[in-house]
Image: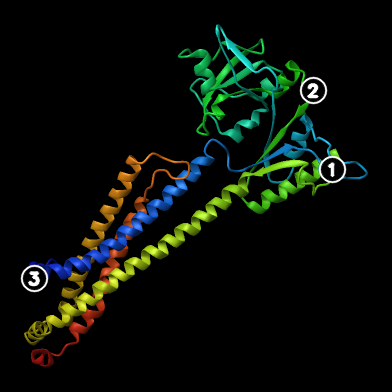
Amino acid sequence: MFDLDKWQEIFSTIKKNKLRTFLTGFSVAWGIFMLIVLLGSGYGLENGVKREFEGDAVNYISINTGITSLPYQGMKPGRFIQFENDDRETLAAVEKVDKAASRTYVFGNQTITYGSEYGSFDIFAISPDYFYVEMLNLADGSRFVNQKDYDDYRKVVVLGKVVKEALFKHEEPVGKYAKINGVPFLVVGHFDDPGGDRDISRVYVPITTAQRVFNMGNAIRNISLIMNDLNIDESNRALEKSKALLAQKYKFDPADPRALFVFNSVENYQRFMDLFAGIRLFIWIIGIGTIIAGIVGVSNIMMIVVKDRTKEIGIRKSMGATPWSIISLILQESVLITAFAGYIGLVLGVGLLELVSKSLPSTDYFANPEVDFNIAIGATLLLIFSGAIAGFVPARKASAIKPVEALRDE
């Protein structure tokens, strides 16, 4: 029940000892302020690195062709490994592989024209599942290359944002024809990609169509395996199995480091996530340590408060005050100082992060420093609990004072 007299007494005590109360609260406020700033900075760093992964899936393995560097079964090194269309289907059957996509590059003249507009852009020939590797943001009314395009050798093309703006300006390109090296392709979509200008300066065409139109045979340069499990061990086992199958077909040493060029996004992504989990743990340890130092300071101050008010407490007890009324008085003052100072530190910390977020331009590895709302609530509850702990020991001591001894205290 709310006790107005008790609160008036608490505020009166605080008013009489302004400097002491301020210094006590400052240590708590500084602790929570540093915890919020450190956590926000950690998330800013994490957001920046995560942004580097935007635009690409984080659960795929990319296998590119290379040149052998080791002799194998009587064959000399220096042989170029060239994948073929059916290799994609072979690797798609490997355990834990959900989808397999193939890709190659259309070399030579890369001029794309529409009316009087033209430009030179990267032309990628892909299979339909390559969409899951790039994770493109298709515009409204657009689609990606589908299985029908692939099977029927359709001359269709999907344009990157830069290509669309260079050729079509403000005109909607879907349903119109753009010429690639003089061959008309129906535009079926256009896309944006947070991966950057390089990714949106591309065009995608069905790989089967490109192989036929541009006389590329059935050669492909890259196979991407989309995994159905974000487990590093499983992805590495699938990779080793895939390398063994390719080594058997193309007769190269599976241990040859240059026969294939591999990028395992699963392993790469998990390595960063593990690193940030360690950073978050480190920040919590530092932040909580700082808060504990502040709480210990509050507890010491409350011990001094009890000492200064020993005679007053003795008089209260001699007039019938219960131990709980003494404990609650000290606890309320302790919780009030801790919670209020902690709230000020919380607000200042969040405010600083907001200011930094709006003022500083995002860099490659630092963006949008922020603190999760649940963490802010948790930190506030932790402060209230810590305030109670800080005040409990001196409160117990105050409640145990005998009235006679208290009245003798000088």
User: Which label's residue is closer to the chain start, 1 or 2?
Assistant: 2
- View extreme (right): residue: 74
Q: Amino acid at mark 2?
A: Gly
Measured in 3D between alpha carbons, the distance from the residue under mark 1 to the one under mark 2, in whole angstroms, is 22 Å
Q: Quadrant of the C terminus?
A: bottom left
Q: Amino acid at mark 3?
A: Lys
Q: What residue lies at 80% left-to-right and 35% top-to-bottom?
A: 81
Q: Would you name the residue on which mark 1 appears?
A: 252
Residue 286 % position (x, y)? 40, 64
| Disc on res. 217 | 2
Q: How crowded is the residue under tag 1: few (<14 C-alpha within 10 Å), some, or many (20+)?
A: many
Q: Which mark is residue 262?
A: none
Residue 212 is situated, as x and y percent measured from the top left of the image, at 75, 18
Secondary structure of the residue carrying tag 3 is helix
Query: Quadrant location of residue 252?
Result: top right
Q: Which residue is mark 3?
A: 16
The residue lying at 28 percent from left, 70 percent from top is: 295
Q: Between marks 1 and 3, how big is the CA–CA gap?
A: 85 Å
- In space, the residues marked 2 and 3 are separated at their CA atoms by 90 Å
